[in-house]
Amino acid sequence: MVLITGANGSAGGDPELTLRGHRTVGVELPGHGLRDAQFRRSYQAPQNLARLATERSPMAGVTLDDYAEAAVRVVRRAAELGPVIAWAGSMGGATLNRVANEVPRLLKRIVYSSAFCCVDLPRMADYLQLPEARESMILELGSAGIGDPAVIGASRTNFRTNDLTMLAKMKQALCADATDAEFLAMLNGMHPDESIEVPLADTRGHVDTWGTIPRTFIRHTRDRIIPLALQDRMIAGADRATPHNKFEVRSVATSHAPDVEGWAATINIVDELARRR
């Protein structure tokens, strides 16, 4: 099973899936490696906000093509061991669409966990302009940004801020269901920089490639970043494109970033899908 993280995330498998007998591997996206220098001294406490706002990012120039190339490489290696299920969360759906377009025959199933699935509109940014996105808190989350993207070459979010107002806003947007400990642990593991190219790239799934693969969408019913109405809009658009191969839809009562219970429910779904013949 290949796991593709969303924005600002790190590569990682899942121990519970491994204990249930599934090989899992996370895709290390370009710019998100341990040696890519996203975590810098200016980001540590006490923070040097002036430097943090101007230091050039290792994400500068990183594109969706780069993400897709990295993910396809992992899928190809995993496929040497058997059929592959590829899972993606949030912005990882853009990468998953590209992978499905490129190597559809290597994929047993693709799974979107409240992830972008662009089909009838080309870009993630286009979906965020729809009426179904009007309740999204993505702009509020963006207020935690620091620096000029044109200068640093990326979007940069200060996840290590100690501004209580900003922390409350980020928690509400990302994982309102989580405990404070879960929330802060998540923030401390997130990469501050993300590509400014990916949300503007064409990431449409193609009917003759992506559209041939069995697929599942796990709806996050309390999501404040990709609201439920927008998730349903993407599901409907995909199903119209391939009426012979519609999404299998599941739902988990959790926020955009699942809390412990929400992730456990997600693992149960993925485990079931992986055990199917």
Image: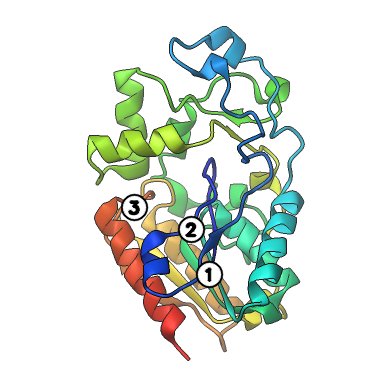
**SS at mark 2?**
loop
Q: Nearer the viewer, residue 111 or 201?
A: 111
Q: Could you say where residue 100 lies in the image, as x and y percent from the top left?
A: 67, 71
Specify the label residue 258 is tagged with.
Answer: 3
Specify the label residue 1 is tagged with.
Answer: 1
Q: Residues within 10 Å of mark 3 (few under 14, many from 20)?
A: many
Instruction: Tell me what residue is drawn at x 27 percent, y 42 percent.
Output: 176
Instruction: Tell me what residue is drawn at x 63 percent, y 66 percent.
Output: 119
Residue kind at label 1, given as amino acid type: Met
**SS at mark 3?**
loop
Is residue 176 shown left or right of residue 91?
left
Specify the label residue 143 is tagged with.
Answer: none
Q: Nearer the viewer, mark 3 or mark 2?
A: 2
Earlier-in-chain disc, 3 versus 1: 1
For marks 1 and 2, give the CA distance: 9 Å
112 shown above or below 35: below
Q: Residues within 10 Å of mark 2 (few under 14, many from 20)?
A: some
Q: Nearer the viewer, residue 162 or 150?
A: 162
Residue kind at label 2, given as amino acid type: Gly
Q: Could you say where residue 266 lies in the image, as x and y percent from the top left?
A: 35, 65
Q: Could you say where residue 120 lies in the image, as x and y percent from the top left?
A: 63, 66
Q: Does the residue at mark 1 contact the one at mark 2 (Cβ under 8 Å)?
A: yes
Q: Residues within 10 Å of mark 1 (few under 14, many from 20)?
A: many
Q: Residue 204 is drawn in which quadrant?
A: bottom right
Q: Does the residue at mark 3 contact the one at mark 1 (Cβ under 8 Å)?
A: no
Q: Residue 26 is drawn in which quadrant?
A: bottom right
Instruction: Tell me what residue is drawn at x 30 percent, y 62 percent.
Output: 264
Specify the label residue 13 is tagged with.
Answer: 2
Q: Does the residue at mark 3 contact the one at mark 2 (Cβ under 8 Å)?
A: no
Q: How is the image coloured?
A: rainbow
